[in-house]
Amino acid sequence: IILWNAKNHFQQMQTLQGHSGTVWSVAFSPGDGAVLASGSDDKTIILWDVSQYTTPPIPEFFTVLEEAQQEKWSSWKTLEVLAQKVTNPTELQLYYTATAAAYKLGDITKEERDTYIINVLNIVPDTFKFDQSAEVVAKVKLVLEKARADGILSSHTALRLDQLVENAHTFADARFTGLVEGLSKLELRVDHVEAEIGRLDRRVDGVVEYTQKEIGQIHKRIDSVRAYTEKVDRKLRDFKKQYKKHLKRKAAASYVSAVVGIVTFGIGSKIIDAASDGSIICFDKIVDFSDPQEVNSAFEEYHELFMEKVDEKLEDWAEKPLEDAVKDVKDDDSSNLPALAMLKACTLLNTSYSTPSSSSPLPPPPPTSETLGDANESFSKLKKLLGLGGDAFDDVPIDDKFMDGFEKLFKIKFIELGSNTKEKCALLVGSSSKSGKIRLIHWRDFYETWQQSGQSMSDYLQSESVSPPPPAQSDLGDEADTFAKLKEFLDLGEDEKEIPVDDDFMDAFQGLFDISFNKLGPNTEKTCRCLVDSRNRGTIRLLHWRVFYKAWLKSGQTMAEYLKSESA
């Protein structure tokens, strides 16, 4: 900031340095101009003491006196103008002196002198600034006493003016006292506010400390819950292992029960000794009853011992295939009950360790609308298979993941139903969407149509035939018609001049031209955006759409072919 001397051809007096940014505003203090305030881009305001470079302004009273001398005014004109400029006791004394001198010189009459002085004294109570020390009052009373002594004021008038001055001084003193009291109250309020701020700071510190402690406790609880969860997980894993062992023991117990059954059938027959001896040997050889191989091996030894001690007929049966031997034994032949029990137990063990038959059970029936529920339930199941959440208004893309979920939901295989069944299914499901994505409302159209057919899903897909041709250029109308259709798809008013080129626009574009970007290639949507919005403004007007549309019409291709060729 540079200070210039305006009275001396704007010579530079001083340079004030302190701001770090551009200074945009400066202002001198009113009255004496001894303080300069400056504001800057550095977000600071600096007050500068420039009293040594400035001079206090000359009061108007003295300015008028100087002008009167230079212009050589008459006495009555000078007194008339000065009467409006008297604002303090010094000026009042000078005015009284000037008026008396003009009277003595004969420039004004006695009546004019009295009139001038009385008029000035009448405005003193309203225009003077009275101080608390009563210096102004004392000087004014001195002038009043002089005017009364010179015969200018009567005793009554002098008393009245004296009372008015006293009242003005009293009012000023009261006002000053009130200001002092108000300032004291404000200081008390400031102290109170500062105390409240301190109290709030302490409370905030306490809350922060408490919150930090609580957060620490929460972290400890989280750690304990995590440790407990890991402990439960370990116990669950141990339980699974124990349960598997239990299942093995349970399976072994069934084999042991077969052994016990043989012994039971053997008791009371003529081969009781052989059965009892064999059972003792069998149980002595088994250490781990949860091991089926060990049980089976011991049982086979028992079977060999038993067969050595029975008659030739039983040996003959044992040498036959187990199934044939069982068929030879009649259930009503009580003498052959031990052999029957023996052979049945052997058959049981033989089939228990055999490999499963190559013939597989019949597949479960395909799901129907009764098992899948209505459209809402089936759509929820489909989204669950796809790992999607949300509500019915969320878009579900018809992609490979969707088709895999569709196969799982209806228990079908597209590859078994035909080469184009998968594409046909995608067209049927998305027939009412036209955007490559569906919501519940589109799924309901497809699902209820399938329900009305009364067929299984595999039969329905094979019976339906869909081959929607792409819309021809002549069917869409001109650029204005298609631009209006796009605004209609996007729920834009007729007065709207611009269309945002966003995801909703691309969905509307696919619906208008009956295409799917996903099927045309990974870069097709990006190519379409670049072609439509060539200037990358994010919005288009009819003018921009006309350029794109005419370029497509000129190509003579379908929109799918045109986008493919441009992508390439």
Image (spheres, rainbow, N blue to C red):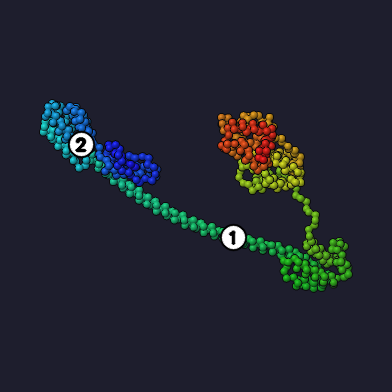
Horizontal side of residue 129 vs 254, given as left or right: left
Q: Is mark 2 on a helix, strand or loop?
A: loop
**Residue 96 drawn above or below residue 265:** above
Residue assigned mark 2:
88
Task: Place residue 357 in its image quadrant.
Answer: bottom right
Query: Quadrant location of residue 421?
Result: top right
Looking at the image, is 418 positioned above or below residue 230?
above
Residue sitting at x 32%, y 39%: 27
Quick one: 512 or 425, which is closer to the camera?
A: 512
Estimate the x, y position of residue 124 in percent, counting from the top left.
Answer: 20, 34
Q: Residue at coordinates 21% horizontally, 40% vertically from top-left?
A: 131
Give amino acid for label 1: Glu
Image mark for residue 42: none
Identify the element where label 1 is drawn: helix
Across and down, in percent, residue 209 comes to: 44, 56
Residue 565 visible somewhere in the drawing: yes
Q: Label 1: which residue?
A: 230
Would you call the spot at circle 2 few (<14 residues within 10 Å), some (14-19), or many (20 or more)?
A: some
Residue 97 lies, in percent from the top left, at 14, 33
Q: 275 above or below 435?
A: below
Given residues 555 and 453, the one toward you in this image is: 555
